[in-house]
Image: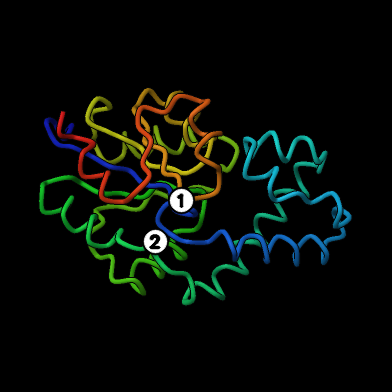
Amino acid sequence: MKAKNKYNLIFDFDGTLADTLAFTVNAATEINRSLHLLSDEKIDFEKFRSTDTMEFFKDLEIPTYKLLFFLYKYQRKQSKQIDNVKVFEDLPEVLTKLKENGVRLGVATSNSTKNVKLFLRNNNLNMFNFIYSSIDYFHKNKILERAINKYGMEKENVIYVGDEIRDIKAAKEAGIKVASVTWGYNFENVLSKYKPDFIINQPEELLNLFKS
């Protein structure tokens, strides 16, 4: 049964809820060296933050199976250091207010459910109604669609909150609105080019999403 007339915010994890950029830069460098994928001079993190993630990986010409192994190693490494990953400043208070205002909160991510649960527990974020995780890294729109169907949401009452170009593309392909936060992986000027429904510069701006 559909959850009618109820507002839903679905959050991306890395770079949106979890401040993982510094960890990602360090982990990617270490894993790249251990797997001998690319020379150091080919890794340009400014370019990574300025382009679509899928296009970035495509330009590097890394075979898909090696990229998937890289992502597997990344999640394993993150799970060992998840206790050190913090939530972005001011987000907990905003999330609490959203919950008090009747907004259902969820997470949809290609990261592991285990990592997300540990992060939420460690940062006292017990206000989330659901976590939907899938390893389908290359089809995030499918992750969103499956989460929406599983938890009985009406698409017109759903907004996806993410920090990357691929989050914008995924939400549009899934037929839902998207709010792009500027404190994550992709820069604001880059996100704006892909025309998200909302640009969020400060966490408290999330409180205005459903006022209209």
Task: Tell me the quarter of the image containing the N terminus.
Answer: top left
Q: Does 99 appear above or below 23?
A: above
116 on left or right of 46:
left
Q: Are marks 2 and 1 in contact (CB under 8 Å)?
A: yes
Judging depth in this view, the residue of 84 and 110 nearest the camera is 84
Q: Residues within 10 Å of mark 1 (few under 14, many from 20)?
A: many
Residue appearing at x 54%, y 42% in the figure: 187
Residue appearing at x 17%, y 45% in the figure: 103
Residue 83: percent from left, percent from top:
46, 77
42 on left or right of 47:
right
Under circle 2, the secondary element is loop
Type of amino acid under label 1: Trp
Residue 32: percent from left, percent from top:
79, 60
Q: Quadrant of residue 26?
A: bottom right
Residue appearing at x 86%, y 53% in the figure: 41
Residue appearing at x 66%, y 60% in the figure: 25
Q: Earlier in the sequence, mark 2 or mark 1?
A: 2
Q: Quadrant of residue 22?
A: bottom right
205 on left or right of 78:
left
Q: Does 49 appear above or below 86?
A: above
Q: CA distance from mark 2 to mark 1?
A: 8 Å
Under circle 1, the secondary element is loop
The disc at residue 183 is: 1
Q: Residues within 10 Å of mark 2 (few under 14, many from 20)?
A: some
Residue that carries the numbered disc 2 in the rendered image: 88
Type of amino acid under label 2: Phe
Q: Does 59 appear above or below 70?
A: above
